[in-house]
């Protein structure tokens, strides 16, 4: 599996706090990779360094064979790297459809007149077609998360970063979201998913890595990684629950 995204010796610290300490990580084309770790482990910071909102102190971010470590976030988005946020951030006063048009036209660097059909398809795919004309600020949490995913997809990503998209959902909502992520992955999009709902990750990803103290401490088959004693200790019993 050829790599589409590679982190080479990525390091970042905020004052005395080290959030990334020489991390090496590769994402294959079409792969779904899960990342877990306790709060403060550096997971979201890692996404920031991939998308360009945070500049690493050392190391490189290589996308599709090119060093993008100093590229601006908007350029990274337009060449195929998109992300969702843990707390959905739609334009609440706009309709659901308008939110997708903005994402496709500005985030994806496309002409507005060229994106309507794509946005309509995404509404269907993400289960939002019947809410196209509703104000985004009036949606339920599940639908806001669906919209967050749809907006990222509207930019036509090759790499999709998901930040705790299952957080705050009840069981059947989580299952619906996992199914949606699987559908996206089936189209060939490479996925990196940070999540505390471990059973959701295990159901959707090929490989699981554990981040702790700014370092990767475990990597491999999801079911095997989650059973490792070191992982169970860090997660304070979450492995048994998973």
Image (cartoon, helix red, strand yellow):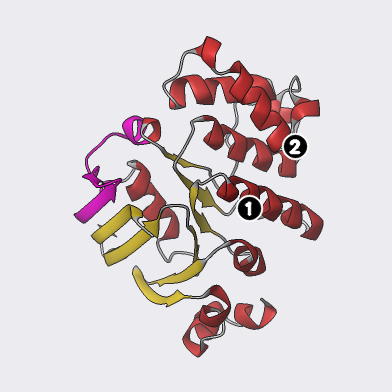
Q: What stretch is highlighted in magenta?
A: 55-76
In the rendered image, residue 157 lying in the magenta stretch gets the answer: no
Q: In this view, does 210 lie above or below 34?
A: below
Q: Residue at x 53, y 14 (%)?
A: 114
Task: Tell me where residue 240 sits by quadrant.
Answer: bottom right
Quarter of the rendering occupied by the N terminus: bottom left
**Which structural element holds mark 2?**
loop
Q: Name the residue under label 1.
A: 182
Which of the two labelled residues, at mark 2 and mark 1, occupies the earlier sequence position? Answer: 2
Q: Residue at x 30, y 45 (%)?
A: 64
**Which structural element holds mark 1?**
helix
Q: Residue at x 25, y 36 (%)?
A: 71
Residue 172 in picture, x, y percent from top left: 80, 56
Q: Mark 2 points at which residue?
A: 127
Residue 181 in picture, x, y percent from top left: 62, 50
Q: How far apart are marks 2 and 1 (CA)?
A: 14 Å
> Number of marks in the image?
2
């Amino acid at each position: 599996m050829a790599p589409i995204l590679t982190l080479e010796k990525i390091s970042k610290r905020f004052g005395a706090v080290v959030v990334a300490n020489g991390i090496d990580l590769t994402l294959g084309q079409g792969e779904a990779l899960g990342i877990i770790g306790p709060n403060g482990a550096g997971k979201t910071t890692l996404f920031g360094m991939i998308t360009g909102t945070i500049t690493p102190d050392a190391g490189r971010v290589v996308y599709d064979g090119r060093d993008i470590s100093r590229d601006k976030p908007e350029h990274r988005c337009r060449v195929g790297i998109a992300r969702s946020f843990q707390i959905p951030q739609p334009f609440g006063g706009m309709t659901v459809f308008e939110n997708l048009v903005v994402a496709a036209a500005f985030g994806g660097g496309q002409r507005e007149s060229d994106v309507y059909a794509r946005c309509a398809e995404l509404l269907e795919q993400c289960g939002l077609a019947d809410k196209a004309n509703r104000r985004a600020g009036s949606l339920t949490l599940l639908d806001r998360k669906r919209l967050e995913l749809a907006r990222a997809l509207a930019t036509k990503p090759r790499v999709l970063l998901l930040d705790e998209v299952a957080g705050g959902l009840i069981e059947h909502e989580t299952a619906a979201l996992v199914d949606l992520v699987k559908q996206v992955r089936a189209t060939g999009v490479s996925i990196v998913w940070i999540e505390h709902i471990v059973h959701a990750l295990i159901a959707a990803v090929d490989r699981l890595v554990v981040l702790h103290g700014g370092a990767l401490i475990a990597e491999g088959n999801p079911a095997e990684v989650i059973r490792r004693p070191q992982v169970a200790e860090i997660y304070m019993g979450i492995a048994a629950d998973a």
